């Protein structure tokens, strides 16, 4: 007799990767979807919700600005939310002065106290790069010197980066610094992407709409590892937690970095005039100050709320945010990938920033989830 029961997928984690997968399996394939989420809300680290005291939409786990040039991703996410027209800028404090980031004509001229033209600024940077003499960069410091030279590196990168990652820049992989664009204009927009903004109504409401389907059951406050041996029968498991934890750390712990926040409500309309202020001085304990009201310029508030961000090395049980990905980490990760590829794990998909041990933005996470879903669908059809 043919079994006509719908197939079941269990998804561990209700962040972007897990939520996209849940929505696709429910809407496109008609599967039963069970989402296990250890927190008391969906959305993972991208969750936001209104602060009950001020009404400001607060990004609980740090700022998340949606940006993409991928039309498929943009079309997909707009099924669940509209976006405002916020355009992200980042400013940085260094030795008592404020500069715009990323590296551009304004930051260069403010640092030098000059008025260089775009061509003159490019020539100055190239001269500093030549002085550094780095041909084959092997770490973050060498990569930065090969891109921007020593003055910009020491002013805006070295101390901030070592504070954020808790390691010397000579001990960090080169790829980290390539996330910052370098421009020779007065464009102070942080991202170059075609589409940018903050979900109107917040990320929390967006995730709730993504997961609003009769085939989707979301189980909050549910620890996968506590329930692992008593999971319902299922055809596929999608795991978006830390891959080393899934395998009980048998090959060692991967390098992660975490953050915590000190929050403060202020009885003033505006604290710093912008959404994000980087603290580039090493003797300032925190890395950034976030002021969330600036993410929704279409709204006004009489008071403000700020988050001061502190980085730390997580202990067992702490949430992890950033994969460090040193050579030693990648060697350990390769062992976990080998395990994941074995036949006994054929029904398990690892994804998202933690599951893939990759530094993924929101758009990358959505894109990889959509691609993986299409691959799975093709394989089962």
Image (cartoon, rainbow, N blue to C red):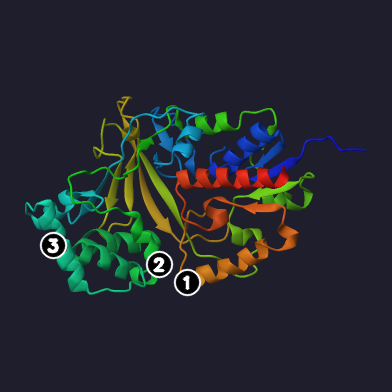
| SS class, disc 3 | helix
Q: Is residue 175 left or right of residue 41?
A: left
| SS class, disc 2 | loop
Q: Residue at x 37, y 36 (%)?
A: 195
What residue would you read off at disc 1? 327
Of 234 and 160, nearer the camera is: 234
Looking at the picture, how far across and down is residue 54, in whole percent? 38, 28
Q: Residue at x 21, y 43 (%)?
A: 187
Q: Tell me if I can see residue 97 in this picture.
A: no
Looking at the picture, how far across and down is residue 277, in whole percent? 28, 46
Q: Is residue 137 left or right of residue 96?
A: right
Are the two marked residues, 3 and 2, in contact with CB atoms closer than 8 angstroms? Answer: no
Work out whether mark 1 precedes mark 3 in sequence or the reverse, and give the earlier one. 3
Q: Quadrant of residue 281?
A: bottom left
Q: Tell me if I can see residue 138 in this picture.
A: yes
What residue would you read off at disc 3? 124
Q: Which mark is residue 173?
A: 2
Looking at the picture, how far across and down is residue 31, in whole percent? 72, 36
| SS class, disc 1 | helix
Work out whether mark 1 precedes mark 2 in sequence or the reverse, and give the earlier one. 2
């Amino acid at each position: 007799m043919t079994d006509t029961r719908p197939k079941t997928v269990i998804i561990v984690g209700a962040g972007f990767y897990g939520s996209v997968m849940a929505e696709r399996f429910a809407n496109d394939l008609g599967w039963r979807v069970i989402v296990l989420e250890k927190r008391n809300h969906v959305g993972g680290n991208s969750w936001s919700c209104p602060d009950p005291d001020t009404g400001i939409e607060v990004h609980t786990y740090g700022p998340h600005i949606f940006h993409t040039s991928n039309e498929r991703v943009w079309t997909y996410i707009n099924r669940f939310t509209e976006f405002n027209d916020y355009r992200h800028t980042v400013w940085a404090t260094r030795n008592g002065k404020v500069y715009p980031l990323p590296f551009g004509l304004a930051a260069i001229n403010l640092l030098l106290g000059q008025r260089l033209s775009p061509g003159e600024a490019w020539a100055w940077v190239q001269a500093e790069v030549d002085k550094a003499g780095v041909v084959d960069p092997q770490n973050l410091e060498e990569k930065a010197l090969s891109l921007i030279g020593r003055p910009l590196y020491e002013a805006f990168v070295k101390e901030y980066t070592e504070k954020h990652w808790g390691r010397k820049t000579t001990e960090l992989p080169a790829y980290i610094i390539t996330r910052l664009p370098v421009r020779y204009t007065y464009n102070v927009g942080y991202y170059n992407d075609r589409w940018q903004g903050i979900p109107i109504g917040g990320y929390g409401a967006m995730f709730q709409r993504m997961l609003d389907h009769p085939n989707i059951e979301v189980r909050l406050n549910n620890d996968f590892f506590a329930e692992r041996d008593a999971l319902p029968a299922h055809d596929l498991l999608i795991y978006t937690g830390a891959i080393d934890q899934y395998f009980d750390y048998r090959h060692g712990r991967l390098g992660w970095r975490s953050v915590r926040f000190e929050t403060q409500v202020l009885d003033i309309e505006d604290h710093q005039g912008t959404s994000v202020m980087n603290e580039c001085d090493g003797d300032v304990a925190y890395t950034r100050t976030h002021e969330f009201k600036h993410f929704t310029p279409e709204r006004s508030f009489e008071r403000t709320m700020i988050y001061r961000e502190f980085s730390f090395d997580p202990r067992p049980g702490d949430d992890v945010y950033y994969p460090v990905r040193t050579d030693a980490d990648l060697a350990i990760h390769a062992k976990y990938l080998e395990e994941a590829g074995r036949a006994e794990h054929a029904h398990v998909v690892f994804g998202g920033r933690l599951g893939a041990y990759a530094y993924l933005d929101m758009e990358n996470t959505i894109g990889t989830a959509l691609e993986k879903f299409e691959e799975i669908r093709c394989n089962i059809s």
